[in-house]
Image: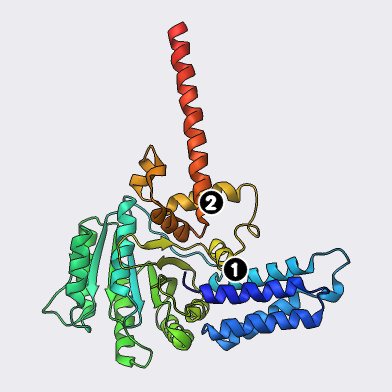
Amino acid sequence: MVLAQLGGSITRALQQMSNATVIDEEVLNDCLIEISRALLQSDVQFNLVQDMQTNINNIVNLEDLAAGHDKSKIIEEAVFNELCKMLDPGKSSFVPEKGKTSVVMFVGLQGSGKTTTCTKYAHYYQKKGWKPALVCADTFRAGAFDQLMQNATNAEIPFYGSYMESDPVKIAVEGVERFTEENRDLIIVDTSGRHKQEAALFEEMRQVFEATKPDLVIFVIDSSIGQAAFDQAQAFKQSVAVGAVTITKMDGHVKGGGSLSAVAATKSPVIFIGTGEHMDEFEVFEVKPFVSRLLGFSSELMPKGLEKVKRYMTIMDSMTNEELDSSNPELMNESRMMQIARGSGCLVREVLDMMEYYKRCAKLWSKVKGLLKYRRRVT
């Protein structure tokens, strides 16, 4: 799993802290130093790491804690919450409404996997009953239209673009107008990849934004971007109204901390993660399950009671319609269950728990139907 090394380093630091005979200021500081070092080595921006360390020190006041308090648990929760804050600015992003035309514009750095992500995003909503369409407003990269055309054709999604027209604004406007007339309810505009040093391309991006007036701008970032992530993401946020983030290439074994920095820079929630090249390797992102899994906490720091039902719903969100409609979910192989667990931010055991719960419910419903049939025969 991407960021596994970071999660392991933080977990070891917390474990060493909890093993101490007495948890005092020195032990806490040593723990925070190790966590900070792990974050910095994973390319998280220095200022974010510093802020996190300061916040934890402010939250965990060992002198004020009465005897009997589990200090290690309090510190663990503080670390958990601060990591969640890095990935969750507390804002919700725009969600398309079925049957109502929405325009979503994708922006990002060159090589971030943006065009593939556009198609995955369209495919995700198509499976759920939306009528998506793709517009290629990338006239800068050679082969961009060909790539989007191939992806869209494979996913059976209508697309618009041009080999002859060089003005991305004109293409974007024409594409949006065409698909609006065709009553497509999710129009996705792919734009050229660019870096903050490229002033002309940033101006072009602003023009496309102004011309299409998208309901949502999604910033796509490669999980391996590194230290440059914060400044690059901030440049995009200052140019257009970035409202959400999608992180790609989460299937690799890279540092990945740069993507955390990018999320902090845009102050926008992560809504999806890409975990591979295939169309279905695109998963809804849930902050708390992700951080829980990262730190090996499972669900022990997650809310109890009703979160169980919500967790089952999150797991089901990562399943295909065919799997949800199947009368025997146990037919899924181990690899697919691992994918579902990864996509929902849960453990494989929790997916198996849901399967077991499903079986019990199905068995109970079978008995109820049997009783109803018997009663009808008797009466």
Q: Quadrant of residue 17?
A: bottom right
Amino acid at pointer 1: Leu
The residue located at (28%, 65%) in the rendering is: 119
Mark 2 surroundings within 10 Å by alpha-carbon count, few (fewer than 14), some (14 through 19), many (20 or more): some
The residue lying furthest to the right in this view is 67
Amino acid at pointer 2: Glu
In front of the other: 191 or 150: 150
The residue located at (53%, 46%) in the rendering is: 353
Mark 1 surroundings within 10 Å by alpha-carbon count, few (fewer than 14), some (14 through 19), many (20 or more): many
Q: What is the x, y in percent for residue 319?
A: 40, 51
In front of the other: 51 or 279: 279
The residue located at (51%, 29%) in the rendering is: 364
The residue located at (69%, 69%) in the rendering is: 76
Decide if residue 156 is on the left or right side of residue 20.
left
In front of the other: 370 or 260: 370
> Which residue is tagged 2?
350
Q: What is the x, y in percent for residue 106?
A: 34, 73
165 versus 70 height, above or below: below
> Which residue is tagged 1?
295
67 versus 359 height, above or below: below
In front of the other: 138 or 149: 149
- How far apart in space, not on screen, are marks 2 and 1 (Cα)? 16 Å
Give the secondary structure at mark 2: helix
> Which of marks 1 and 2 precedes in the sequence?
1
